[in-house]
Image: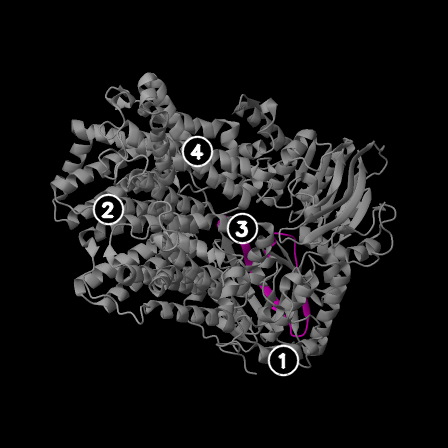
Amino acid sequence: MWELLARSLEASTIFLFAALGELISQRAGVLNVGLEGLMLFGGTAAFITAQTTSSYPLGLLAGLAIGGFLGLAHGFFCITLRGDQVVSGMGLWILSFGLTTYLGNPYTGPLGLERVPRFFGLSPFYPLGVMLVATAWFLLFRTSHGLAIRSVGENPGAAEASGIPVAVIRYLCVTSGGILAGLSGATYTLSYNPVWNYNFLMGWGFVSLALVFFSMWNPWILLAGASLFGIMWQLSLSPELVLPGVLSRYVWRTVPFAITIPILCVISTPWFRTRWGLAKPEALGRPYAKE
Amino acid sequence: MKLGRYELTLEPRPALPPFHAVLTAVVAILLALAFSSVLFLSAETNIFTAYRAVFSYAFFNSHGLLATVHRSIFLLFCTYAFLVPLRAGLWNIGLPGQVYAGGLAGFAVPFVLGAPQVRALPPDLLIVLMMVAAATAGAAVGGFAGVLRARFQVNEILVTMMLNSIIFWLVAYMIKEGGPFMSATGEGESFGLPVPLHAPLLLGVPFTALLALGAAVLLDPLFAKTALGYRIRAFGESPAAARYGGIIPMALSLVVFLLGGAFAGLAGYHYFAAVPGVYKIPGNYGYYGDLGFYGIICALIARGSSLGAVPIVVLFAGLSLGARFAQGELRLPFGVDYALLGLLMITFVASHVLYRFRFAWRRIPPEALPHVSAELPQE
Amino acid sequence: MKRGSAAAPEPILAARGITKRFPGVLALDDVDLDVYPGEIHAVLGQNGAGKTTLMNILFGLVQPDEGTLEVFGRRVRFRSPHDALTHGIGMVHQTRRLVSAHTVLENIVLGHPRVRGVLNLRAARTEVETLGNRYGFTVDLGARVWQLSEGERQWVEILKALYRGARILILDEPTSALTPPEVKILLAGLQGLVRGQGITVILVTHKLPIVMSASHRVTVLRSGKVVVRLKTAEATEEILVHHMVGRDVAFRSTDRALPRGRPLLEAEQLAAFNDKGLLALRGVSFSLREGEVLGVAGVTGNGQEELAQVLAGLRPAASGSVRFDGQDITRLSPLQRWQRGIGYVPAERSEVASIAAFSLVENITLNYHFDPAFTRRGVLDDAGLERLTQRILSAYNVKAPHQHTRAQHLSGGNLQKLILGRVLSRRPRFLIAHLPTHGLDVEATAFVRASLLDARAAGAAVLLVSEDLDEILSLSDWVAPIYEGRFGAVLSREEADAETVGAMMAGSLLKGARGQ
């Protein structure tokens, strides 16, 4: 039982890192729907680097670097060029999907390194995730920088008029989001399931995106949601632990995705919508142009 | 970027003449070809040999040409599946799921009817039934996302991606490990279609080609000339203004997703049930769904024009097929066509940028040149 | 204004030769501005004269193409509002620059150089409260900005600028969204700041009464150039109008002697929620005959937008009913209402009433795509629509290169004329006009008002929603001031005078006269 829980929490870190990064980016008003792409590329880069250098730290670094670079590119398109954030996100996703399939193919298969050490069965990434959540919460709600970030996401015009460099803040947030997405992908390929296969994420990135919406942009709720999803996902992989013999395991795999849909609908009901609507960064998704 | 007295800036283009749209599409395609040559270079192959192999297989080899045609039909349906909602400003990323749903529904027809009935009924009727079932299933899946979007304003990207994953696993269930559609040999693939149910061929090409070409010719006038097309375009430009004009968002979202989904369903029918030599859902069917993403790129590069999409689709179909062939011949790594997919997306985005911006040299005002320190006034 | 003993006092802010070009237009042409310490300096001009661009340059939001700026005697160049704030210049914009979801205190300390790192809001709160008391400021620092009235929000912005150390305050059209009593409070407060605390104020406006009553000196801008600089004591309204417009403008007076028709529209206790889920319209009733104009006077945000949308069918009524020509239309869709002869000119010209990327013909189609006269079995009658567009363009004097120009290339006035022409060409029997002259120049405004009166003469019932009291008083047969979602009263034109209506718009006299 404990193993199942530990594994669930490890799965949840994948969702958590990516969603936390996206939360920060969205708090500043930049939407990245191509989150899955950054995760794929980060994970692939990490895997290839670790495989060729036999070094986990280098692999991790590669994943972070690629994620940050792609985040920066997204930022350039959305902030400086004021392009459509959805187009850019989709572009990054398809780009990553295509390129990682090609680049990672020679490395298909297991990583071949000693597994990342676990402490009492729990992977070290989970406590890291909790720390990151606490840091993010503190940054956003207890510092002047966080106030600036949130203001940029609500009303960039107001922030600009208060002397805040809107573009700089947005770049920092979207790049941080990219780095965290890279971390998420690297965690997957280096620790959670160190076997490379094309499109190894199978839609997790979009679930992470949904998680950001569910969490009402609050890091603690996000942690709870990610943990829940991690448990659900692990259960769907081994349903015989809960309901032996019922339905093929393939049908169980659909459960995490299927659950997301009604939750998305519930969020849109009027009762929820007012509270959610007030929590949503008002300028999310809208390019900002100085007068 | 400053250079002495002048600086290079990126400024928005004031107007967007239609000529530019064609120009940027052409630029996108040329960039695509340039990028694919990078791929070949990386494999230490002579570019000309590589390109010759690619194009001669795709367009001048009898097998290759036929394969290109089949893939073009598939991609054309996928393109229209994305294009129709795109004109309404909606993203139908769920087209792979709708493709699988269409394939499943098409196969469900003979499965449900049972072998005796299949032998008894006229094959043409059955084929039409299969097609209709496929289109309906795709439309249903698409329509579900459309309703959710209109009624609950749920982000359609999220819903359709969830549906993709759900349907992907459902198909796996159907064809693997004892699922209903599994073939007798139990190899994790579906049963094959009996010969009478193979799609009839015209000039060696499945009749679905007619449907695809028909759509190519009819969709553009639909958007330009009909009231429905006007409403879709208005909604795509400005949902608020469309609402003011009397257009009902729910109805419109539903219509475009139904239509888009139907096209995707037809793509599924075509690929699994109409391409000679296939006629079954194979164990590694994931590949075909992913190929559907080419449809997204073609629709975007064609800027929503159904007729304009045809040459782009044919080019990409041939390029990806030829690249796959060359991959084997020239010993390139797996996934060249995927890499191409990714690179093409950059070219599209780049062309999108060029479409909206231009580089300009500006003379820096003299006052800006000398550095002025911003000292605080003495208190 | 105090006179220096020996030499003339130095200007606290001096701009010379400011020039700014935007693609296709010369916004400012060699503009000079001198502002002296301790004065209220008015910058007067019509919409499009360049006032806001000039202020944006003074505040560092925009960089001039040519020209210099001296503040407190030093040459400066502002690369961003941060620089301007460091130099003691604060700006309160025409549209609110506040984060509505955050508290007043959070908004005031946003970006402040002293409030850095870990947020210590308690210390900041004490400082801000002291400052507020000094200036006579009484808004709850813990309130969320979306809960405040327009006037209160303005004071938050002023206090914010003062907390940043501003000695020069730029106010861009500060009275446009205020009720008359709030305007009085604002002007009195500014006088207090100037006399008591030595703050200098630059007041940007197009309203003559404000200039005459509150300023010491005035600079008039027209089409990007400075046309005259005067001491207010030496100016009159006529002189200022003459410089602002470039010639004398006569307003048409309206005649009242028109026969009344039969009752056409009856609204009974209409209520509706706004987008945030709050009850914005709280029970409005009125009845309108053919050929009558009901002017709904109120400051934006008091429910008139929701009223217009409910009547147009674009927003569901939470309760209440609407009857048109004897039939209950409360549940009808917008399309059904257009087909029955209701027309709507929304306030958002380019976001709702038109589609920027569409051609003029396609924009006309927005009200015609469902009309059987222009569609044949689902296909649009392009030729017929083009003929219609041509007729509208000439009848409404819309200046455009040709029919297939995109709507985004039209100026505000021409776009509004196009929209009005489109709606009126359907000969609606009930017309809803929401802020129809907002942001338009004098000529376009006069044209739009004349068109509304023509519609009235043709027998249409008109609901006019406007913030401009003069407009309401000159066009309406009935006047209904709206405040917090209710009509203060429905007054006939004879009974309605500016004071009463203004007071009701601000919420007083609400318990008095009610209903029709």
Element type where label 4 sits in the image: helix
Placement of B175 over or under C24, stated as above or below: above
Name the residue tied to disc 1: C126
Distance Cα–Cα, label 4 vs label 1: 62 Å
Residue occupying the point 53% across, 24% down: C378
Between the C-alphas of marks 3 and 4, the distance is 24 Å
**Local crowd size for mark 4, using a 10 Å CA cut-off: few (<14), some (14–19), many (≥20):** many
Residue C116 in picture, x, y percent from top left:
50, 76
Measuring from the top left, give residue B178's x and y in whole percent.
29, 39
Asked if the residue under mark 4 is in contact with the one under mark 3, i.e. CB atoms within 8 Å, the reply is no
Q: Which residue is mark 2?
A: B35
Q: Is residue C23 visible?
A: yes
Residue linked to disc 3: A266
Q: From the viewer's perspective, is the residue at label 1 or at label 3 nearer?
A: 3
- Say whether marks 2 and 4 touch (CB < 8 Å): no
Mark 2 or 1, closer to the camera:
1
Give the residue type at disc 2: Phe
| Residue toward you, B237 or B274 | B274
**Chain under label 3?**
A
Query: Where does the image place residue C307, in percent across and percent down from the top left?
Result: 71, 45
Q: Residue A281, image x and y in percent? A: 52, 59
**Left or right: where B259 falls relative to A180:** right
In the rendered structure, find residue C328 and report the number of the disc placed on it.
Answer: none
Which region is colored magenta? C23-50
Q: Chain of mark 4?
A: B
Locate residue C174 relative to residue A26 in the image: left or right.
Answer: right
